[in-house]
Amino acid sequence: MVFNKAGEKKNVANSSILMYNYNWFMICINPGILEERFVKSKRFVSVLFDLLQQLLETEDMTDALSGTLEMLIRVLNCEAGAVWLLARESDFLLPVVSAGPVNFTNISTENGVGVEGLVTRDGTTSLISDATSADYPGSVFDDCGPTVRNMLCVPLRNLTEVVGCIQIVNRKDAGGFDAEEVQLCERVAALAALTIEEKGFSVSAGAKKDVLISLRGIIKEFPSGEGVLRVLKGIDLDIYKNEFVIILGESGCGKSTLVNIIGGMDHLTDGTLTIDGKDFSHPTEKELTRFRREYMGFVFQQYNLMPNLTAQENVQFIADLVKEPMPAEEAIAKVGLTERANNYPSMLSGGQQQRVSIARAIVKNPKIIFADEPTAALDYQTSIEVLEVFEQIVQTRGSTVVMITHNPEIARMANRVVKLRNGVVSSIRINLHPAQAKELVW
Ligand SMILES: Nc1ncnc2c1ncn2[C@@H]1O[C@H](COP(=O)(O)OP(=O)(O)O)[C@@H](O)[C@H]1O
Ligand SMILES: [Mg+2]
């Protein structure tokens, strides 16, 4: 038998792993799967034996997981897949290995969000037969791999906890995954999880950041005819100190509505909004005004400058509203407009006007800057210049920037990309090494 052969080669420590896994393996192959009448079952048993051998003989856990994933993809005739592991300190999921036409380089996702995050958090298998259906929770795959048609995602569960998940995507033949195949994947994942535990394999994505804004179950409805239009259907999201977050999603999916609520420009219908530990779910108008003025900077697609004030006067006007602004000249300098400080908006290009509006946002020394499609009206070169200003603000001032865009290329420069779909967060992608603004091309 495979395990005897493998066992003879192993030292004492490894043979304990062997027995451990062997015991588990015997639990895994229940009589149902061994019944002769299932032709497929026989094949599955041999897959499990092969896998056991691979897992036991490997010195390199990444290789073993890669082999495991490839085996599942081959046996179940799928197009792509990934193995995700939980990085404990940050609560991020890292793709340890992937297969097929995907690009997960530098990418991670958040525990509890999207298929991968939900399977890992809840420890329950997710079988998606149609990824266009309304109840598909979304996935990082949607951004970084082939168009998802169907998916099977199983938890990597050892004896005590869930350490990640295995995901396989797009079955090539017409049929979906049957119950037996789901079971096979679950058992393969159990074997892999036990081996991961036994070998003490772990991943790291750095420390968890401090939460600045926290949203839980945010619902927003607008009156519509006789009834209501529910635009946000339960948004759970944390925004951290000193990060660049980009919110992506199709037109009309609720991006501006969400940012208006976080930014104190609109009231939520239900849910909890916490800012710096304080509950801001139902603020008074006075609290809202103070909070917008002191905490927040805003940049919109339209520059909203006052035409009869110079660039610097436009910035000074805002600085005069708050307690501890930075000097207006400094804000103008930070956006590279010192030479143009005395120009009126009509004398400035679109990009320069947008930089004045960014200077107006940063002059307040806000904790957080919201930018709603700030480059939508600008050409490529000017957009890059404006994006470089935001990049600088995050890197040198320790601010948080939350930017809405529908341009996926811009998302490459974010620390995190939050995707909205059907009024909920469908995926959160973490760029472990964000691109620089000047590297973006569209
Ligand atoms: N004040 C409002 N009253 C009624 N419906 C609104 C209001 N604001 C937004 N909506 C509706 O909410 C949905 C989301 O809008 P929005 O947040 O602006 O989308 P996005 O910014 O993603 O393009 C749209 O269907 C829009 O018509
Ligand atoms: Mg919008």
Image (tube, rainbow, N blue to C red):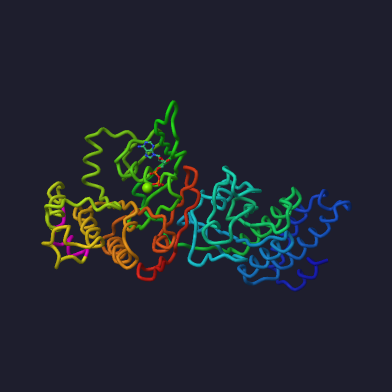
The question of residue 331 being in magenta is answered with yes
Find residue 365 and report its horizontal and vertical position in percent.
Answer: 21, 54
Magenta residues, start to end: 325-335
Query: Which residue lies most toward the front here?
Result: 346
Q: Which residue is rendered at x = 44% and y = 44% of the image?
A: 236
**Left or right for 333, reference 110:** left
Residue at 43% across / 45% down in the picture?
252
Question: What secondary structure do most residues of the magenta stretch adopt?
Answer: helix
Looking at the rendering, which quadrant does residue 190 occupy? bottom right
Q: Quadrant of the N terminus?
A: bottom right
Q: Position of residue 141 (x, y in %)?
A: 55, 58
Tell me: 343 left or right of 435: left
Q: How many marks?
A: 0
The residue furthest right is 36
Look at the picture and state if 207 lies above or below 297: below
Residue lying at 46% horizontally and 62% vertically, measured from the top left: 205
Q: Quadrant of the C terminus?
A: bottom left
